[in-house]
Image (cartoon, rainbow, N blue to C red):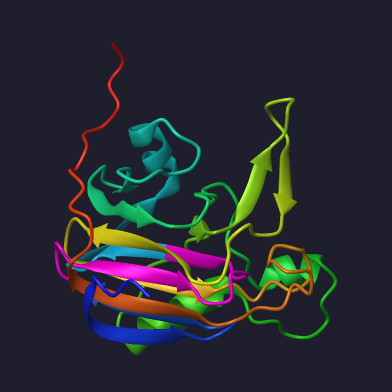
Amino acid sequence: MSAEFQHREALTLPARYGKAVRLKKGEAVQVINLHGTQVVDCWAYNAHDVSEYMSMEATRVWNQRLNPQVGDSFITSQRHPILTLVADTSPGVHDTFMAACDARRYELLGCTEPHRNCHDNLFEAMRELDVALPHGNLASFNIFMNIQVQPDGITLKTLPVVTKPGDYIVLRAEMECFVAFSACPQDIVSIQGQGDNTPRDAELRILTAGFPQVQLQGPWIPA
């Protein structure tokens, strides 16, 4: 799998749990959907100032797209590129709209017992790197998540993922940054693929070379 990529570390992203990595500028992280069924939530933070974080709102403005394509960058709350999507072997279906699941989300879905969730996974993953975040962040980049805009142009529909085993994306760091991931624990709303909606492991690889060298693009400016 991706034999041309050179990596310095490979990590399991356990089902229902989170993991964070620190990337140098120019390194990349490969997110592999091992089973072809798993949604992975993603956040990124400036490694030298975690009050600057990847913003889905700023990203949509920069790219003028609802969902990223290869060559598109993810933009911070200070309007700086932080990650660029340089490879994607999946069908290219991802989501920038839906909030990360949190404890309250599962309460509203009827859970009476604590349920693992992406928002808590973010904090747990960053604590493993001895990083304390100043505030929560529900606005994740939802890798492989299938949210479709309906024909009326305003309604969204939540559907299972359309990836296959081994599909991956590669995100290149445009600054030194922390990137956190959560193998989404959602098992009530049908977002995971292959019918049973069971969260499963994914894999992360920190890449140093061999990935596509996509040119960084500037922001959209009206003609």
x and y percentages locating residue 204 in the rendered image: 38, 77
* Residue 157 on image: x %, y %: 74, 45
Q: Considering depth in this image, is 34 or 140 the residue closer to the camera?
A: 34
Would you say 183 lies left or right of 208 here? right
Foreground: 7 or 41? 7
Q: Residue at coordinates 58% horizontally, 65% vertically from top-left?
A: 164
Apparent side of residue 46 relative to residue 115 in the rendered image (left or right): left
| Vertical position of residue 75 compared to residue 23: above or below | above
The reply to whether residue 51 is visible in this rendering is no
Which is more toward the observer, 126 or 154?
154
Figure label count: 0
Residue at the image position 66 percent from the left and 42 percent from the top: 148
Residue 183 position within the rendered picture, expressed as x and y whole percent measured from the top left: 54, 75
**203 horizontally vs 109: left or right:** left
Q: Quadrant of residue 68?
A: top left
Q: Is residue 113 left or right of residue 124?
A: right
In-front residue for pair 162/184:
162
Q: Residue at x 32, y 77 (%)?
A: 205
The magenta-colored residue range is 24-42
Residue 108 lies within the magenta run:
no
Q: Residue at x 72, y 51 (%)?
A: 158
Q: Give the quadrant of the N terminus.
A: bottom left
- Whether residue 196 is visible to the viewer of this picture, yes or no, is yes
